[in-house]
Image (cartoon, grey):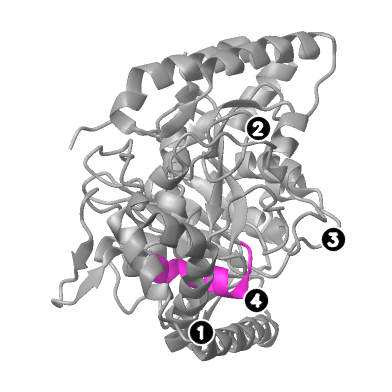
Amino acid sequence: MTVLDFTIFDASKLIAAGELSPEELVGAAITRIQEVDDEIGAFSAPTLDAAREDAAQAAQEIARGNVKSPLHGIPVAVKTLVDRAGVESTSSSRTRAGRIAEVDAAVVERLKRAGAILVGQTHTHEYAYGVMTPTTRNPWHTGHTPGGSSGGSAAAVAGGMALGAIGTDTGGSIRIPSSACGLTGIKPTYGRVSRFGITSLSSSLDHAGPMARTVADNILMLQQLAGYDPRDSASIDLEVPDYSEALDGEVSGLTIGVPRNYFFDLIDEEVESNYRAAIDVLREAGVNVREIHLPHPEQYMAIEYGLLVAEASQNHQETLRSNPDGYEEDVRALLEAGEFMLATDYIKALKGRTIIRDSWQQMFRDEQLDAVIAPTLPMPAVRFDQLEYEWPDGTVEPTINAYVRTSAPGNVTGLPAMSVPCGFSPAGLPIGMQVIGRPFDETTVFRLGQAYETRTDFTKQTASLVRS
């Protein structure tokens, strides 16, 4: 038995029926970590002994009929950006070497309350300021990046070392690695999941959310993670719906928007082909497909970086002065660049974000859209050290720009956005489709993802650790 044999949804049912024990499942995850993580490098701080103890306790609780939630007994990994009391939570930075968190982040509190078994902290691109996660390799092809910044979380799940993981998303950092590693991951609406206890990169763009194999798994995780938290100033006091309603996958009569612009300015031919085929699947399921023109596309990246660079440099100002050599070169360069940004430009970015957010919501109303469907990434996972990508027309684009370019609209608007596997490149690297929904309408995002997933078999395929 390996963790790759299960999804959260299926394992939860087996555990509740007494046909699978948390100790067996968590034991399989631990064995897998010991077998492959030296090569994959997903974990910054595995907590295997504690996981064994927690699994034994979960087994006793479930045997007494005390099933806390569908996550009870399920092995889950947590991004090192997310504090876990008593565990090394370093944001994968030398500036925080040896840092032990004192209190649990809100999402960790909720996972523990739900009975999930935490198997360790996972690597991020330092302070989540990048898209490569250089410490970690892609379980589908180890010569390639898992994406970032939640690359460790994605690699842990794709590599069969956990059934679910927590990621954060400031410029695509849940969706990018989910697409690169063949997972489903959702960035909920801004304010839906508390960020208390999560190291901030850019507070007006930061989100937290789940990553797992399937839509159903994400539903089970988000149901436990979502909810108001007064400790997060951005948290919205809004009732959390029953996301399981989306499992019927009933999408007949829904209307999706297919962009004519922006997402296809520079895109890999194979990615676009798989994306177009995915649209056809949804059309055959009864979805109305409407071509749309995205408003103000020339502003997305400028606003994303205008907010991100300024806020990140403000967050790191003190450490950048006291310990500049503690940062990796790429992150330090970005933080230093942010110090030269004018306050007037930052204010322009704030105003621009409001215009973009309002114009997208107006587009949803005018076009009567339930969601926008777009490619998650413009190309599959690049080599782990490939900092630039050359397009067929000779255009050379920094990898970070290419990956953030298709993810940024979800962060700038704050809308819920989920990546779902929709194919593979000729080299066997996963390709993702992005579902962007109305504010706080994660249910429809899930419903569209579920409808697509049940009509294809991409989520049934698992990484095979190809050495490349």
Residue at far front of view:
322
Which numbered disc, 4 or 2, marks the residue that appears first in the sequence? 2
- The question of residue 176 being in magenta is answered with no
In the rendered image, the vertical position of residue 455 relative to residue 267, given as above or below: above
Q: Amino acid at mark 2?
A: Ala
Instruction: From the image, tell me which residue sits under label 1.
Output: 294
Q: Is residue 264 left or right of residue 46?
A: left
Q: Amino acid at mark 4?
A: Leu
Residue 356: % across, % down: 58, 84
Q: Nearer the viewer, mark 4 or mark 2?
A: 2
Residue 367: % across, % down: 64, 84
Q: Amino acid at mark 3?
A: Leu
Asked whether the viewer can see residue 25, the reply is no
In the rendered image, the vertical position of residue 205 relative to residue 380, given as above or below: below
Magenta region: which residues? 404-416
Nearer to me, 125 or 282: 125
Q: Nearer the viewer, mark 3 or mark 1?
A: 3
Instruction: From the image, tell me which residue sits under label 3.
Output: 238
Q: Nearer the viewer, mark 1 or mark 2?
A: 2
Query: Is label 3 in contact with label 1 (beta carbons under 8 Å)?
Result: no
Asked whether the viewer can see residue 209, the reply is yes
Query: Is label 4 in contact with label 1 (beta carbons under 8 Å)?
Result: no
Instruction: From the image, tell me which residue sits under label 2.
Output: 85
Instruction: From the image, tell me which residue sits under label 4.
Output: 369
For numbered disc 2, what is the local secondary structure?
A: loop
